[in-house]
Image (cartoon, rainbow, N blue to C red):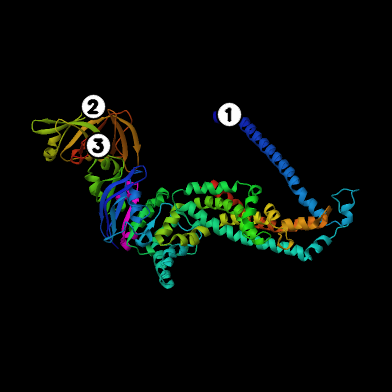
Amino acid sequence: MAQVSIRKVVKAYEGGVQAVKGIDLEIADHEFVVLVGPSGCGKSTTLRMIAGLEEITSGEIAIGGKVVNDIPPRDRDIAMVFQNYALYPHMTVFENMAFGLTLRKIAKDEIRRRVENAARILDITPLLDRKPKALSGGQRQRVAMGRAIVRDPKVFLFDEPLSNLDAKLRVQMRTEIKKVHQTVKTTTVYVTHDQVEAMTLADRVVVMNHGVIEQVGPPQELYHRPATRFVAGFIGSPAMNFIPARVENGSGALRLNLPNGIVLPVPPDRTSRYSAAAGKEVLFGIRPEHLTEPKNLDRPNIATFELTPEVIEPMGMETLVHLWIQGAEVCSRIDPTTPAEPGRPLQVAADLNHMHLIDPQSGRVL
Amino acid sequence: MSTTAAVSRDHPAIYHKVGSLRAERRWALWTAYASLIFAAIIMLAPPVYMFLTSIKTSADIADTSGSPWVVHHPTLENYRELLSSPMFLGFFWNSVKVTVCVVVVSMVISVLAAFALARMRFWGSQWLATGVFLTYLVPDTLLFIPLYQIVGSLGLLNSAWGLVLVYPTLTVPFCTWIMIGYFASIPKELDEAALIDGANWMQMLLKIFIPVALPGIIAATIFAFTVSWAAFVYPTAFITTPSEMPLTIGVVSQLIRGDTFAWGQLMAGALLAALPPVVVYVFLMDYYIAGLTAGATKG
């Protein structure tokens, strides 16, 4: 077990394209950190640099306090789980899991003990004599995890391990991975493009975009206090609504002028925070659950206005209502019992205690 | 009512379509069978004729009055004479010796070369891979003149070992090419998993790549075996001593004396010579096809 330090790490390819642009990240011992972001954001490259599968252009990576830049993958004491499992097709499950230990010349009894122990943790004991082709996707994923567990490495690396599974199995395996981490407590770096996976698994989430880290923090912090427009839009499903607005100063209080003539009063406790933005164009950000029907909101700082739904999506436990405010699509989460239909005006209430204002130029949340 | 009417109105159209599909399929099948039967007759006529000739007596062969496809007095005399002749068995042994050595040498070189070219990214590897294949396109009828000089300068003319030296110039490029295709079809993550598990390049090749690429290796082995077993130009050019001759030229040079052709023994010898490749192909055909098509069908 060990901490992982990433210091000013850059990955540049031939032709000068930078996949990772000087990132810094400290991962504590036992921590479960998820790197999340869209395709091409540099998250997989970062993971592969930790694994030693990609060379580091500049900067340094240390595992357990030891700089590993020039150490080959086999001597870094890490284990990796791949998206396509990468099981050796000609070996049985037992042999797959034992392969790394055999190469390290560990005694046969010890290998058997470790493989059987990992198989018990992952509930794959009856599969030990099977070849990978006789396993289902979920079982293969367990074996791939087993192969990592038996090595008892300093760090687990997961590269989009659930992307090849169907939706139901993905949820099941997600729980499984969390359970395994709670049991073995190995420091884990996990890469995914799925923000739900990131939120549910991580102690801390690292949101990456265009080769830089946008924000690092516990899932709830990222959800409630995003630092940038990108994080605000990326974390949460359906995504946060962004509506162009103008901050106006009127008799000591701030207010927001939205399209369609909607005027929202800024809560008094936020006046000092937003006062510098007075007279400027901003983006008003609010999550769908904070834009709902008035009966669900009975507290101060609620603003009610009328909008016309264009699309209604009943989800069972809730209903999503899509509305358009001058070109901006806005999503509202309402109670499934509330009658709503396209074209019929609907009273919606914005909970301004949860509003965000974003500087459209810098993309920073004010 | 209206639904029923709509369905019955549509039925004739549907059945017409199905009927036309069936007719098309039947026509395609007939054409396929006819072509296959025609091709099979063309391909099988020579070996069948060889077999019929090999079980004829010399008198039967010389008798041109009846149909040559009819055997009046079948005999295994030709086979018995060949198989009891130390010279023929010597040819056979030379072929076996040369082929086994060539297959081993070719496979060792081409598996190592293909692994390096397919997996170890180094400067110029792409060009080298193309170059390897291009050398295969140079015909042996062109190469045997310079090779004669090289083999001669090494003192290996008239020696079966000279053939072990020159046959790999034919087998290695193609085998390497087959193996590059096969290795390229193995997912990159498999080597990465092996690297992280602690394997070095040689362990990765021996414990992962060779077992996984076994169909490709078998395909390449069959190819090397066939080329070496059936080679004609090189032994004709390099070997003149009967004791060093392989089957292909031994049968021809020793059973044709001047203008006297021992047809029965010639045919028997040719069939016996063709037997090992046939046996190999029959048993390993599936691997051969899987190996040749690996690069083409997998990503």
- Report helix, strand or loop for mark 2: helix
Amino acid marked by disc 3: Glu
Q: Which residue position is annotated with label 2?
A: A260
Q: Chain of mark 3?
A: A
Are the two marked residues, 3 and 1, in contact with CB atoms closer than 8 angstroms? no
* Span of residues in magenta: A179-199
Q: Which mark is residue B5?
A: 1
Q: Residue at x 25, y 36 (%)?
A: A293
Distance of mark 2 from mark 1, alpha carbons?
Answer: 54 Å
**Residue situated furthest right in the rendering:** B65
Q: Is residue A74 left or right of residue B284?
A: left
- Please state which of the two labelled residues, at mark 3 or mark 1, is closer to the viewer: 3
Q: Is residue A239 above or below residue B63?
A: above
**Residue situated furthest front in the rendering:** B153
Label 1 crowd (10 A; few <14 / some 14-19 / many >=20): few
Q: Position of residue B37 (x, y in %)?
A: 74, 44
Q: Which mark is residue A293?
A: 3
Q: Are marks 3 and 1 on the same chain?
A: no
**Residue situated furthest left in the rendering:** A251
Q: Earlier in the sequence, mark 2 or mark 3?
A: 2
Q: Are marks 2 and 1 on the same chain?
A: no
Q: Across the whole image, how many numbered discs are drawn on residues?
A: 3
Q: Splitting the image into 4 quarters, where does residue A189 fall?
A: bottom left
